[in-house]
DNA sequence: TATCCGTGGTT
DNA sequence: TAACCAAGGAT
């Protein structure tokens, strides 16, 4: 292809795609106007997340946090709760951190500046380009997975889109395609085409507005492009979960401030060694003494509570991007009656258990005096533990897997 | 550069 | 079922 032919193909692509978008674009909540805050929130939510999933979250989030100021001033737990179920929870914390930065450094106004927007927590190359182009109509590229797929096919590019360097190259190409004065619409058009027509598995070339000059299709490679190296499968983790019930309430804890499911609440659970895999086989008995013992030991060391596993409740699975949790859930009671004898009978660790119980009763008494509800106490592991009932779940953010487990346990 | 971060829909 | 993957970013 000559240089002139390439330029013609590019002009054709930009013109036809833009016209197609303006006729075919979906009516989405964040397209009501170009308010930078609305664009910002939508772009963060849309990271690695489907449009249909985002829509209800976006509506609820904007209703509860309608402005940068409202978001900046909200309690973090309310923000996390509103994000519950959407995943990648760091997005929520970063978004709020960004809102606070906008309040403090830019007087509550999102600046029309690529450098400033790029400096906000959770805003990377794609999102900064999306905000600058959609909210301010500035000619920056917004290259996501859709755009890499569409341009890989149209220009028959065979670089591995899993490599960061490839995205940089496609950004350089994408800038040159932006029509004068139409950056926002054009960038959205690229993504809209990828979402609706130029889909990963079976691209709809027959209805594609630019199929006539699509080099990938002409070469017969529309289904092999884009080239993308396979991701590693998630590693298995076998875990035992405790539903400890006392006076109609269930013991939960808050995860650490960083890492997986940071600051979310959960049922206590312990990691089993890889050798436990056999115990999760379909024909293996559901209740294994070994698991119950692990649960007793680890939970006691973590929370300071002595629990007694009773019955197998259910199995559950949860797949993260990089970890596959296989969970076996046990119902358990608190072992308060005859506690010292129980400690002795199990042998070893008696001192730890005795101290733990003492610490637990003390902190519970303290917190019930200072707070009228919800005794909260620190475990030996530094995590915060508390007893909740069904209604308390409305306040605390839980990962979906525990919502499922507790929902079934409580018969929701 | 590779790995860590969720969840749900499709195929 | 299992694999794939979706409007990515941080470290």
Image: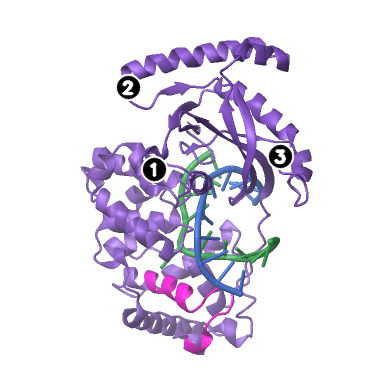
Chain colours: A purple, B blue, C green
In front of the other: label 1 or label 2? 2
Label 3 lies in what chain? Answer: A
Which residue has dot 2 on it? A371
Q: Which residue lies at the image location 44% right of the left edge and 55% below the top edge? A: A125
> Can you tell which mark lies on residue A273?
none
Magenta-highlighted residues: A188-207
Spatial CA span between label 1 and label 2: 23 Å
Question: Does A401 sit left or right of A60 as displayed?
Answer: right
Residue at figure coordinates x 63%, y 31% from the top left: A309
Q: Which mark is residue A80?
A: 1
Question: SS class of the residue under badge 3?
Answer: loop
Q: Is residue A49 above or below residue A199?
A: above
Pick the residue in front: A307 or A197.
A307
Label 3 vs label 2: CA separation? Answer: 38 Å
Q: Nearer the viewer, residue A42 or A235?
A: A235
Instruction: Please report the residue visible at 54 percent of the width from the left and 40 percent of the height from the top.
Output: A260
Residue drawn at (39%, 45%), measured in percent from left and top? A92
Where residue B2 appears, x then y in whole percent?
A: 66, 48
Decide: is A94 above or below A206: above
Q: Which residue is mark 3?
A: A287
Image coords of residue A225 (percent x, y): 61, 74
Could you classify mark 2 by the number of other residues whose Cα lies within 10 Å: few (under 14), some (14-19), or many (20 or more)?
few
Quarter that holds the N terminus of chain A: bottom right
């Amino acid at each position: 292809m000559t240089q002139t032919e390439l330029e013609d193909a590019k002009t054709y692509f930009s013109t036809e795609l833009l016209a197609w978008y303006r006729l075919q674009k979906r009516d989405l909540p964040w397209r009501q106007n170009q308010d930078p805050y609305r664009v910002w929130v939508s772009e963060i939510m849309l990271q690695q997340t489907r449009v249909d999933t985002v829509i209800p979250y976006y509506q609820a989030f904007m209703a509860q946090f309608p402005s940068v100021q409202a978001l900046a001033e909200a309690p973090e737990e309310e923000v996390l709760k509103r994000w519950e179920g959407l995943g990648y929870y760091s997005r929520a914390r970063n978004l709020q951190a960004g809102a606070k930065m906008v309040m403090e450094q830019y007087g509550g106004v999102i600046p029309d500046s690529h450098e400033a927007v790029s400096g906000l927590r959770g805003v990377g190359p794609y999102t900064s380009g999306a905000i600058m182009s959609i909210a301010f109509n500035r000619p920056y590229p917004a290259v996501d997975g859709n755009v890499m797929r569409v341009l890989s096919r149209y220009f028959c590019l065979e670089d591995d889109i899993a490599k960061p360097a490839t995205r940089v190259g496609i950004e350089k190409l994408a800038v040159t395609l932006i029509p004068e004065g139409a950056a926002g619409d054009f960038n959205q058009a690229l993504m809209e085409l990828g979402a609706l027509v130029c889909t990963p598995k079976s691209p709809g070339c027959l209805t594609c507005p630019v199929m006539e000059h699509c080099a990938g299709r002409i070469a017969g490679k529309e289904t092999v492009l884009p080239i993308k190296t396979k991701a590693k499968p998630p590693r298995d983790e076998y875990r035992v979960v405790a539903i400890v019930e006392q006076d109609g309430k269930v013991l939960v804890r808050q995860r650490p401030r960083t890492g997986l499911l940071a600051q979310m609440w959960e049922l206590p659970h312990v990691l089993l060694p890889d050798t436990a895999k056999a115990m999760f086989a379909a024909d293996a008995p559901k209740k294994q003494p070994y698991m119950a013992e692990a649960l007793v030991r680890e939970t006691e060391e973590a929370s300071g509570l002595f629990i007694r596993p009773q019955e197998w409740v259910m199995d559950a699975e949860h797949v993260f991007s990089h970890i596959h949790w296989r969970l076996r859930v046990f119902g358990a009671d608190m072992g308060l009656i005859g506690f010292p004898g129980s400690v002795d009978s199990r042998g070893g660790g008696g001192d730890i258990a005795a101290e733990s119980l003492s610490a637990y009763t003390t902190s519970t008494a303290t917190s019930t005096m200072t707070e009228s509800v919800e005794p909260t106490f620190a475990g030996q592991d530094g995590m915060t533990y508390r007893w909740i009932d069904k209604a308390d779940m409305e306040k605390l953010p839980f990962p979906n897997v525990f919502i499922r487990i507790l929902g079934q346990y409580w018969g929701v």
